[in-house]
Image (cartoon, rainbow, N blue to C red):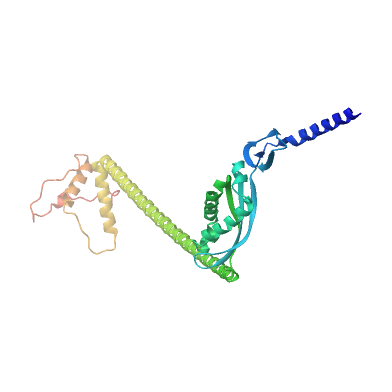
Amino acid sequence: MIVGIVIAVVVLAALVALGTSLRIAREYQRLVVFRLGRVVATKGPGVVFLNPVTDRTQLVDLREQFFEVPHQVAITKDNAAISIDFLIFYKVVDPRQSVVAVQDLKGAALNLAATALRSVVGGISLDDVLSKREEINAALRVRLDEVTERWGVKVTNVEVREVNPPPTVQEAMTRQMAAERARRALVTEAEGQKQAAVLAAEGERQAAITLAEGQQQAAVLAAEGERQAARLRAQGLAGALEELEAVARGLDERTLALQYLQTLQRVGESAGSTVVLPMELADLAAGVRRLLAGTGPLVPGPERPEGAPIDDGMVQPAPDGLA
């Protein structure tokens, strides 16, 4: 009976010892092992066997974490008091250093971030604080990382979340924003009027160019028409002259004599008291007489000396058909 109790106690003690000597670390966790107060190893992930009498452990999370820095009041370069809060993202890269080198990682990082913020903001103006957040984030990250590196912690990012200037500055910013909007409206209106004037001037210029081109084309067409008309008139005159020349070539001496006599008849029938007779009337009368007699052609007779009398026998009355 006593032996059974002893065996049961031994087995129970062995189970308890086994349970206290086993630790299970997840993929993102590491166990920093202290043996008799000294760091001997960093173990994990998986099952870790420990000496329950001499070993003690501390669990470290390797995942990226963040903490919020509450509103901190800082003075800018141009003596403006502003309130800023931001977020710090970090991760442990050396589990042993993160346990041994710093007691309270988040508390130390929080105070370090507050001092770094005042140092960075004190070197820039209020306008830059409001407009250059990326530069502030980068400067804070560099300053924090320089210190936390020896703690085995890497600061991956810093994000300024909110910047609150003083109420007086906010009112001035509101007035400035309203003035800027009014200025932009005036500039936009002036730009629109300028563009409208430019378009109107361009339209007038195009209209003037089109009108000038139309007038030029009209003048060219008019000149071309006049040239064509002159050419047609010249061609008509030339044709008429050619026809007259052809008719004149086709006339014989008899026809000329008859037309000459008809002309003299019309002159004689006129109401005028003065009659102009051609100098070759005598020759014409002789030629007509020869034609009527059928004795010769209508040719001018011999020249009569100046002042010689006209032979009355050479002029005979014309036939009744010619009178």
Task: Locate residue 25 relative to residue 149 in the image: left or right.
Answer: right
The image shows residue 247 at horizontal and vertical percentages of: 29, 42
Picture layout, residue 167 above or below residue 196: below
Circle count: 0
The image shows residue 57 at horizontal and vertical percentages of: 68, 41
The image shows residue 292 at horizontal and vertical percentages of: 23, 43
Picture layout, residue 200 above or below residue 229: below
Q: Nearer the viewer, residue 233 or 113?
A: 113
The image shows residue 3 at horizontal and vertical percentages of: 88, 28
Considering every residue shown, the one lying at the far right of the view is 1
Give the residue drawn at x 32%, y 45%. Answer: 235
Quadrant where the N terminus sits is: top right
Give the residue drawn at x 22%, y 39%. Answer: 294
Q: Nearer the viewer, residue 160 or 34?
A: 34
To which quarter of the image does residue 31 belong?
Answer: top right
Q: Nearer the viewer, residue 18 or 241?
A: 18
Q: Nearer the viewer, residue 6 or 263?
A: 6
To which quarter of the image does residue 114 belong?
Answer: bottom right
Give the residue drawn at x 29%, y 60%. Answer: 270
